[in-house]
Image: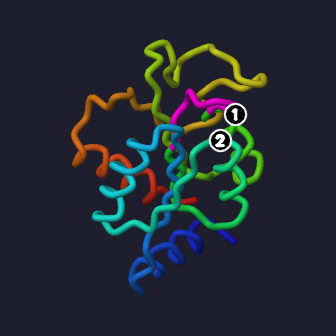
């Protein structure tokens, strides 16, 4: 399918009331609860996972408009999960948040031979320095990019 047809299909989904689906992956229950609640208030269909492994498993079961993941989790990190998701769908919008100030899109850190810029679209500091409204605007921007 061409990019123009995919973009049109995405707009049609929104016009007929399809909720945007977000996969929220974080090992901290309070983060999943608070951000999941906010995302539901914004009208998103939110699927939550408490680990990178569970996130990857859930990703394989559904079509997501955005993957929103933490970096540091027991087992598989957010970047490792993102790298695997990008092998399945190279255009999947992925937002990563992290408490590691060294990690940014220009970082030379390698995860399985892949740099952060190859795995994710945006890296947000954790705790976020942006407001909830700014986070929502960022998410909307990522989800409105043609896939």
Q: Which mark is residue 37?
A: none
Task: Kindly identify the residue that appears in the image at 44 percent across and 51 percent down.
Answer: 142
Question: Which stretch is magenta?
Answer: 69-77
Determine which quarter of the picture holds residue 39.
bottom left
Q: Using the numbered discs, state the Cα–Cα distance from disc 1 to disc 2 in whole angstroms.
A: 5 Å
Q: Secondary structure at mark 2?
A: helix
Above or below for 51 versus 139: above
Please state, as top left, top right, bottom left or bottom right, where the N terminus lies in the image.
Answer: bottom right
Residue found farthest to the bottom: 16
Q: Is residue 70 magenta?
A: yes
Q: Main SS of the magenta segment? A: loop
Q: Secondary structure at mark 1?
A: loop
State the residue position of label 1: 76
Task: Kindly identify the residue that appears in the image at 40 percent across and 31 percent down.
Answer: 124
State the residue position of label 2: 52
> Where in the figure is residue 48, as x and y percent of width and height?
52, 55
Determine which quarter of the picture holds residue 37.
bottom left
Camera-nearest residue between 33 and 61: 33
User: How many residues crowd around disc 2 within 10 Å: few (fewer than 14), some, or many (20 or more)?
Assistant: many
Above or below for 24 versus 28: below
Q: Is residue 133 magenta?
A: no
Left/right placement of residue 47 relative to residue 127 reads right
Camera-nearest residue between 16 and 68: 68
Q: Are marks 1 and 2 in contact (CB under 8 Å)?
A: yes
Residue found farthest to the front: 29
> Where in the figure is residue 42, as x and y percent of width and height?
29, 63
Camera-nearest residue between 17 and 9: 17
Task: Kindly identify the residue that appears in the image at 41 percent across and 77 percent down.
Answer: 14
> Where in the figure is residue 56, as x and y percent of width and height?
70, 50
User: How many residues crowd around disc 1 within 10 Å: few (fewer than 14), some, or many (20 or more)?
Assistant: some
Left/right placement of residue 98 relative to residue 120 reads left
């Amino acid at each position: 399918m061409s990019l123009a047809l995919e973009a049109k299909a995405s707009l049609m989904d929104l016009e007929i009331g399809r909720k945007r689906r977000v996969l929220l992956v974080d090992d901290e229950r309070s983060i999943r609860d608070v951000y999941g609640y906010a995302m539901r208030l914004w009208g998103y269909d939110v699927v939550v996972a408490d680990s990178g492994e569970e996130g990857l498993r859930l990703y394989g079961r559904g079509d997501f408009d955005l993957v929103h993941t933490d970096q540091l989790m027991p087992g598989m990190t957010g970047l490792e999960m993102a790298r695997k998701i990008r092998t399945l769908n190279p255009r999947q919008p992925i937002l990563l948040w992290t408490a590691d100030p060294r990690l940014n899109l220009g970082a030379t850190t390698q995860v399985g031979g892949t740099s952060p810029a190859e795995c994710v679209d945006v890296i947000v500091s954790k705790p976020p320095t942006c407001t909830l409204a700014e986070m929502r605007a960022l998410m909307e921007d990522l989800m409105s990019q043609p896939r």
